[in-house]
Image (cartoon, rainbow, N blue to C red):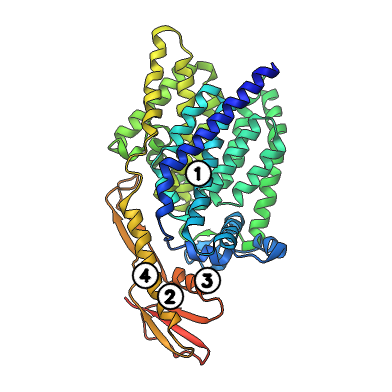
Amino acid sequence: MVRSDHASARRAALVGLLACLWVALAWGWVLRTGLWGWDVYPLIAAGRVDGLGGVAATFGDELMGGRYPLGRYWRPLVHLSFGLDHALFGLDPLGYHLTDLALLAANVLAVATLARRWISERAALVGAVVFGGNLVHADVLAVPARRADSLALLFTLLALTSVFARRRFLAALAVAAALASKESGAIAVLVASGAAFALAQGERRERWRQALRAAWPAWCAFALTLGVRTWALGGLGGSREAQVSAAWSDALASLARYFPAAFAPTQARLLGGGAFSCAVALAAVALYVVLARRDARRTLVPLLLWFVALASLTAISRAERGWYELPFVALNGLFAAALFERAFARVGIQRALALPMLAWALASLFPWRAASPELIAAGESARVYLGQVESAVRNASAGSAVRAPGLPQELRDPRPWLDGRERTFAVLAPYSVAAFVELAFPGRAVRVVPPAPPSLPDSSQIVLVLER
């Protein structure tokens, strides 16, 4: 038994090493891109810390120090990660992309570990490859500001893994960390509770008792973290466009749009129309129910709960973006692993049902059109523009006003979002330019204003006017 455990641990370590090498090969192109996106520089500026006191103060600070114009959020772990990157790499894009690449590798390993505990050892590699090869990672890796989604997903996966390992206090810590990474991390407590109920055995009352015993530390950690968040923001915060009523009015439409990303083989946008993608996803779920029979509850209950919670939260936020697919793609990988295991476990000719799942995983080994020229162009556009800004400020004297060219705000990508809407890349905004100037010239007072007649600067100040 001990020898078998050691062999299993060695195989898991080998799979982990191969997965990390594959992530580096498949997505290493992102290391050649620059820093872009409206929120990157404000996050770097707000994430800087000075000693342990600064780390503690992060948990009482609003996202971006209140710079974000479209809502109020609390993401202290995102701030801390950017603070560490800035301390190690300054404004060098390579360091920030290395961190995001490491986060992707950690998420791939988390999917593999969860699949190994939840489903089987041989299915773990299928789940990791299906998740790690999805095109959504191009959207997340190229823009460090989207790191919040990676962090929230990582801690949600760790919470689930801890539940299956019967480590309820580790699950509670992961639940708190997920919420401290992004608002969507709030669902980690629901997913962990669903997994605890699915694992429980016996009569219904006994299952509820076991689930409550396993889940109460996670709910306590969630309540405590939510309390800190409410204190830091002076309320619940969130997007200015968010509507709780949308959980009922728009939830069904959101479920339909994200269902293919959660359960259809490969990327939803590559399967054609939404109706076809949903049909493929429904067929895959129906096949799993037929194969698993009574045991389907153990896997599908947590996955479906996770999916419904994610889609409902998206409906409430009234914002859908391509990188919001990331947690749904983790569902996709775990479901692919479960379906592969159930099909492969059949005997005789029925084992051939595992072949489509194997093809699904093999196709994921080579991400299609991963190195998007539009992503690279967006980074280059931001780099050139901020170089012009830096030159203008460096050559300006105190008490003067200087002008910078018009902002490169958006680039178009021919690939649409899930619902067919036009896909664009937001490059820079006035508040992100202001944060860059603050970082590049810490000893100078620079006021960035939009394209309008500026007020006169005082004798110690430079006014930078952004033209149209």
**What is the quadrant of residue 419 in the picture?**
top left
Kind of residue sitting beneath label 4: Tyr
Residue occupied by mark 3: 439
Kind of residue sitting beneath label 2: Glu
Q: Residue at x 51, y 56 (%)?
A: 95
Instruction: Using the numbered discs, state the Cα–Cα distance from disc 4 to disc 1 in whole angstroms.
Output: 29 Å
Location of residue 1 in the rendering, given as x and y in whole percent from the top left corner:
69, 16
In the picture as drawn, the residue positioned furthest to the bottom comes out as 459
Identify the element where label 3 is drawn.
Answer: helix
Kind of residue sitting beneath label 3: Leu
Instruction: Using the numbered discs, state the Cα–Cα distance from disc 4 to disc 3 in whole angstroms.
Output: 16 Å
Identify the element where label 1 is drawn.
Answer: helix
Residue occupied by mark 1: 104
Tag 4 or tag 2, which sits nearer the N-term?
4
In front of the other: label 1 or label 2?
Answer: 2
Q: Residue at x 36, y 68 (%)?
A: 384
**What is the quadrant of residue 288 in the picture?**
top left
**Residue 385's mark?**
4
**Residue 390's mark?**
2
Kind of residue sitting beneath label 1: Leu
Tag 3 or tag 4, which sits nearer the N-term?
4
Q: Residue at x 70, y 50 (%)?
A: 224
Location of residue 372 in the rendering, given as x and y in whole percent from the top left corner:
33, 49
Mark 2 Cα within 10 Å, few/some/many (few <14, many 20+)?
some
Query: Position of 142 compared to 98: left or right?
Result: left
Tag 1 or tag 4, which sits nearer the N-term?
1
Tag 2 or tag 1, which sits nearer the N-term?
1
Instruction: Using the numbered discs, state the Cα–Cα distance from disc 2 to disc 4 in whole angstroms.
Output: 9 Å
